[in-house]
Image (tube, rainbow, N blue to C red):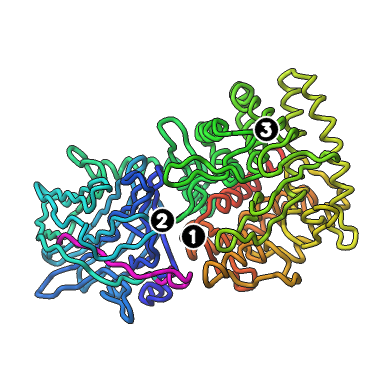
Amino acid sequence: TDVLHQYQKAIQYEWLDTNGIGGWASSTSIGANTRRYHGLLVAASASEKGRTVLVSKLDETVVFDGQHVELGCNQFPNSIHPRGHQYLSLFCRDLFPVFEYQVEHIRLRKTIAAVQGEDTTLVIYDILEAPRAFTLLLRPFIAARNFHSLSQKNEALNPDAQWKNGILKIQPYEDIAPCWIVVPEAAFEVVPDWFFDFEYPCEGECGLDFHEDLFTYGAFSRTVSEGDRIGIIISTRHPEGREVFGLLKREEQRRSSLVTHIPRTQPELRTLTLAADQFIVQRGTDRKTIIAGYHWFNDWGRDAMIALPGLCLVTGRYDDARQILTAFAEQVDQGMLPNNFPDNGEPPVYNTVDGALWFFIAAYHYLKYTEDEEFVHDTLFPVLKDIIAWYEIGTRYGIRIDQDGLLNAGEPGVQLTWMDARIDDHQLVTPRHGKAVEVNALWYNALVIIAEMAEHFGDTFDARKYTRPAHQVKAAFRRLFWNADKGCLFDVVHDGHRDASIRPNQIFAISLPIPLLKISQAEQVLDVVETHLYTPVGLRSLSPEDAAYCPQYKGSPQARDSAYHQGTVWSWLLGPYINALIRVRRKTGLDQAARVLERVWPHLDEEGLGTVSEIFDGDPPHTPRGCITQAWSVAEILRSGIEIQTRTVGKK
């Protein structure tokens, strides 16, 4: 309660509730929006131009004994108004975000739920205590704009609304779908007006515009008494015949079913399993995909393949995994997996060398978990063989096999590895052209995996065809990448130059299903990673001893892009680090891995509540930065936790 009453502290805690098609409801623990991406209904399908912040918020006022007590909370230049957080007695995030308010002898609970499979948000008010009847006023604030932009007062907005039988219909702009707001047994006072200069401090801290004007069509009012339950539907779908509490019950049952296999003694794994659900979204009618992170990412191929085992396999969501693998397999082009799918429906972008290689790792784990040989043989195996063939003859962006069998990639101005930041959309911060260490560890794994699959499916000729280059790659990798002076691996080899920067990319040589190094070398790599890169919330992207190291990720877009892979901590890398711990140190490593996770759990109660942030500052106290929740961050920590719990690391 003390934190909730301190505005600057309370706005550091954010919640997110997603709808399974790319939309969401999201704000802070006190209901004050601090980002352009916050909103009560951020719709995935309301506009052809991408996700849309339709309804920004719904502010409440309690009217009793001649008093008007406002429960909303907003930041404006030099002021916070109203200060409804002073009446908050509780905020919690389990199946849904829940707020409890205490106003003298009145106590009410608000629950918010995004409905799976549609752009619909439910808001439920339970009147827990009230000595006598009082009036609840509800004012919706409308943004009706692309989620990357901000709204300003304009003449194009349609100020007219239709109000009939407890249903308000609005359509602020012609190119955005109508929205219905249902408040049963309520009156509606039509008072169209603009409210100016809502302030979003998170945007200001990033050097971006951070003021917005919001429109209101008026306010709902309803008389309520103790024991009443008011259910509100906010939706792009016509509400006729829809029952709000039935929708809520269905969503509650769906979410509860996701965690039935998680023991109550493992609350962190239960929390992360619910968080994992937020990233799995529908793509078209019969395919699914993985959103890389909220609030601003769409689906990225590399991220999806890395996240798939943690989101779908350890959680038993095999059908989702199959749909995701199928969706990406269908988009493989010239041996390359899409790097990302633009939000506006444009064709996918293919600037990634490792996305297709992570596809092999995802397929490998899928087969191990599901034993679904028919699907792998019929759908994935031909695509995997095609990828190998293209990489051997050469594909886009200079991606092709060198004479030593190692994979070479890169051309000026194109970023191909996961370290892909660019300044002002042209200057690459970490170009990493040539033979990148993790890319070649993945390439070796791809060759061994395809050889094992060919053997398993009775294709001994192909098995031998892939085994020979795998042996060549292993020998060349050990010879070319080993840095004897530092006892670790070079990061990139290009035109005779070996980059000795100490980065986490080398961990993949000992964490992937088929390791490349001798155990003595693996031990040294692990020691170097721990000494230079390990933090309680992830691995640094560059050693602090490097002259290019950036201790903090903050400031202007240019400053943040410069730091993104130059020391910033990435939490998803704890997954490969834990794999390496267990592989290299066995029982001791398993015990150490459990302690690594114990140090992560406190983060679930900060920043994005119940989830894992994208990145953190390289220097202590490792402040969370970037997306409040990231697919591969959640997935790799959840996967590690479940595999440690069941002691099956390395078997699955």
Residue 123: image x %, image y %?
27, 54
Residue 342: image x %, image y %?
47, 46
Label drawn at residue 387 = 3
| Image label count | 3
SS type, badge 3: helix
Residue tagged 2? 16
SS type, badge 1: loop
Q: Quick check: 486 left or right of 607?
A: right
Disc 2 crowd rating (10 Å Cα; few below 14, some 14-19, many 20+) is many
Q: Estimate the spatial distance between the alpha carbons at disc 3 and disc 2, rounded to whole Å.
A: 37 Å
Q: Quick check: 430 left or right of 112?
A: right
Q: Nearer the viewer, mark 3 or mark 1?
A: 3
Residue tagged 1? 628
Location of the C terminus (image quadrant): top right
Instruction: Identify which residue is drawn at 23% across, 57% down.
Output: 126
SS type, badge 2: strand
